[in-house]
Amino acid sequence: MSRFLQLHLLTFYPPANLNRDDTGRPKTAVIGGATRLRLSSQSLKRAWRTSDAFKAALDGHRGERTQRLGEVIRDHLIARGTDAAKATRIARDIVPVFGKVKPEADKNPTRTEQLAFISAEEREAALAMAEQAAAGAKIEPNAASLLRQKDTAADIAMFGRMLADNPDYNREAAVQVAHAITTHKIAVEDDYYVAVDDLKTPDEDAGAGFLGEAGFAAGLFYLYICADIALLRRNLSDEGLAATALSALVRAAATVAPTGKQASFASRARAHYVLAEAGDQTPRTLAGAFLKPVVGNDVMAASVEQLRQLRAAMDAAYGPCADRRCEMLVGETGALDDILAFCRGV
């Protein structure tokens, strides 16, 4: 068994605004003196975790990040015939295990102040305890009775969680996801757009009913992912789930885009190049291949070549940086199924 699985992906997105900053423009980073587009790891993980492919592969083994577990408990009890006031009290008794509950006078008195990452097993345990309380039993909500130190939720095992009031039940992320960056310099452009009032009559002015402005850019992104297989298996209550979780992660990373402004740009894409590496060696990113921005008319070919060159140079300088590798380049070699089979076998 290899300890680490490393993934390197190159994906081209046409004009898009997949991940916005606080001004609504595409996120960027300055690298090697050149401005690059950037996709935050948070936006990528969110897109993967909520994708249909991820849900289908890990049905019953996904968590929910929410402030609303108390509402789920309250509504569950009300549906079973419990008085609304009593259901609210029971929910407020249970949810502090998952996070600080909002004040009783708040408009949402059963919500937590923070988002909590909750597995399906923990959710069911909370509902079962609530049912006992509604039936008149004395309950003692505490971490030991409701939280789990090993996961049935693969996404919690992969991406980790923090419970400030119950740190013994925190989860160290077994999967590290870098911010994706373009291999070349970019310029964010402005899209000036208008909307016309469909009911405006011909004798009125020709002006638009609305006008707006939005930033966009296109680029070829390099993405690096590192999975600690040993930690993933320790995090999971079912060791056999690790292979399924890795397969779902790789498929999502290769085929799922962040959802920002998709209705306006339809910038759905799939990875053009994927390199998977397995071994016990200390992981390393290959982002340095693009410290000097790629130039020329064929950015894809040049990016693949620069990545391969740095990989070989790293091996020459440090010795083999992986024991086994599998590569996919659309139109040249390999297929996603080959990558998935490789990852399932690490």
Image (cartoon, rainbow, N blue to C red):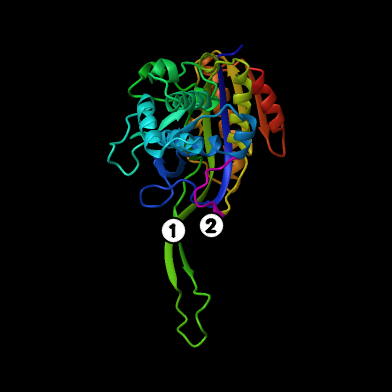
- Magenta segment: does it hold 262? yes
| Residue indicated by mark 1 | 214
Q: Position of residue 283 (x, y in %)?
A: 50, 20
Question: Which element type, helix, strand or loop, lies under badge 1?
Answer: strand
All told, the count of numbered labels is: 2
On residue 17, which mark appears?
A: none
- Magenta segment: does it hold 71? no
Residue closest to the eye, 74 or 239: 74
Residues packed near mark 1 inside 10 Å, few (<14), some (14 to 19) or many (20 plus): some
| Residue indicated by mark 2 | 264
Residue 32 visible in the current orientation: no
Q: Position of residue 3 (x, y in %)?
A: 55, 14
Residues packed near mark 2 inside 10 Å, few (<14), some (14 to 19) or many (20 plus): few
Asked if residue 172 is positioned above or below residue 27 in the image, the reply reads: above
Q: Please, what is the dominant secondary structure of the magenta stretch?
A: loop
Q: Position of residue 16 (x, y in %)?
A: 52, 52
Asked if residue 186 is positioned above or below residue 281 in the image, the reply reads: below
Quadrant of the rendered structure where residue 101 is?
A: top left
Identify the amino acid type marked 1. Answer: Ala
Q: Residue at x 63, y 39 (%)?
A: 272
Residue 71 visible in the current orientation: yes
Is residue 150 rendered to the left or right of residue 238? left
Q: Residue at x 52, y 30 (%)?
A: 224
Cα gap from disc 1 to disc 2, whole angstroms: 10 Å
Identify the amino acid type marked 2. Answer: Ser
- Bounds of the magenta segment: 256-265
Quadrant that contains the C terminus? top right
Is residue 205 rendered to the left or right of residue 334? left
Q: Are marks 1 and 2 in contact (CB under 8 Å)?
A: yes
Residue closest to the eye, 132 or 341: 132
Q: Position of residue 38 (x, y in %)?
A: 45, 42
